[in-house]
Image (cartoon, grey):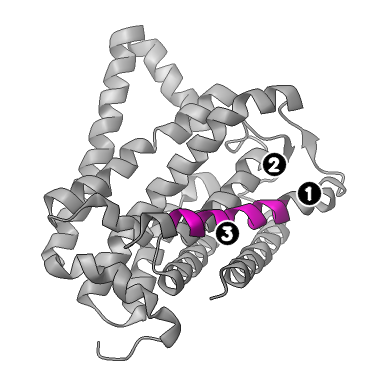
Amino acid sequence: MTAPRPSAYLPHEAYVAPARRSREIWRVFAGGAVIVAAYLGLFALFGAFLVQSYGQLIAGAILHRIARGDTPGAMILLLWTFAALAAGPVIAARLVHRRAAGTLFGPSPRRAVADFAIVALPLVGLQAALLPLVLGSGDARPGLAFGAFLGYLPFALPGILIQTGAEELVFRGYLQQQLAARFRHPAIWMSLPAAAFALGHYLPADYGANAWAIALWAGVFGLLAADLTARTGSLGAALGFHFSNNVAALLFVGVENQLDGLALWTLPVDFSDPEAIGPVLAVDFAMMVISWLLARVVLRV
């Protein structure tokens, strides 16, 4: 693993520097175990709270509704439960690696916030500008009423930030930093977190024969997010990239019966039908690459 890093990735050196003091590979496995334990443990506490408050039957119904995300309240609760996932890398950084949790965002918190805003605002604007093309297809159906949408927005936007932030902390924060501290070649510290991210999106029970295509999309997304992180030396750009994508997918135009509780419009797409999913994925792949290129333009990297 001695190949030189691309010059464009020089900012990544400072991003990875705090992880070098505890770069033993066994710590990555230990940290991963801490992340899983924290997520499952905190989620179990939430479930126990529901059982204690409402009883087993009602608690089960609430959790089922949250998993479906088909109402505004259920969707907001689902997004906010990702705080349990965000706690994992924070605890792992402190407990396993003896470093400040803030280092997961990069050497400069102010730079991370700036990168997030620089990327998120134009990408959300791009998604909004393209809405007429989606709505003009004739397949879009009205979702949440606009007045109700505005009322839920102060809770939905922080929820999406928590959800995307949690995933970025795990994959482009903790995993990318610790792997890059141990292995110099980008093929390892970019591809392994992206593969793990893809595996988390491989759901054959939901997507049938198309599950691999959804996972492939997630894997490519992970690689592009890792590239933005390496070019900027902070987590902010990848978080803005991820946040804008999920704002469009969860708030603007959602997939009918697929976490669509907060969406202004929905599209009836059968994810298990190869003929139906093909055009949707092609458009999503194109939008993902265009968004990545626009992010690089506004960041000037």
Question: Residue 139 bears which disc, if any?
Answer: none
Quarter assignment of residue 195 = bottom left
Residue denoted by label 1: 131
Image coordinates of residue 143 in percent, x first then y, are 73, 30
Q: Are marks 1 and 2 in contact (CB under 8 Å)?
A: yes
Which of these two is toward me, 129 or 72? 129
Label 1 crowding class (10 Å Cα cut-off): few <14, some 14-19, many 20+? few
Question: Residue 119 bears which disc, if any?
Answer: 3
| Quadrant in which the N terminus appears | bottom left
Question: Residue 252 bears which disc, if any?
Answer: 2
Residue depicted at x 68% and y 27%: 150
State which mark lies toward you, 3 or 1: 3
Amino acid type, mark 2? Phe
Relative height, residue 123 to residue 43 (above, below) = below
- Label 3 to label 2: alpha-carbon separation: 18 Å
Residue that sits furthest to the bottom in the current view:
3
Q: Main secondary structure of the magenta part?
A: helix
Amino acid type, mark 3? Val
- Label 3 to label 1: alpha-carbon separation: 19 Å
Q: Which residues fall within the magenta stretch? A: 112-127
Image coordinates of residue 156 in percent, x first then y, are 55, 33
State which mark lies toward you, 3 or 2: 3
Q: Is residue 210 visible?
A: no
Label 2 crowding class (10 Å Cα cut-off): few <14, some 14-19, many 20+? many
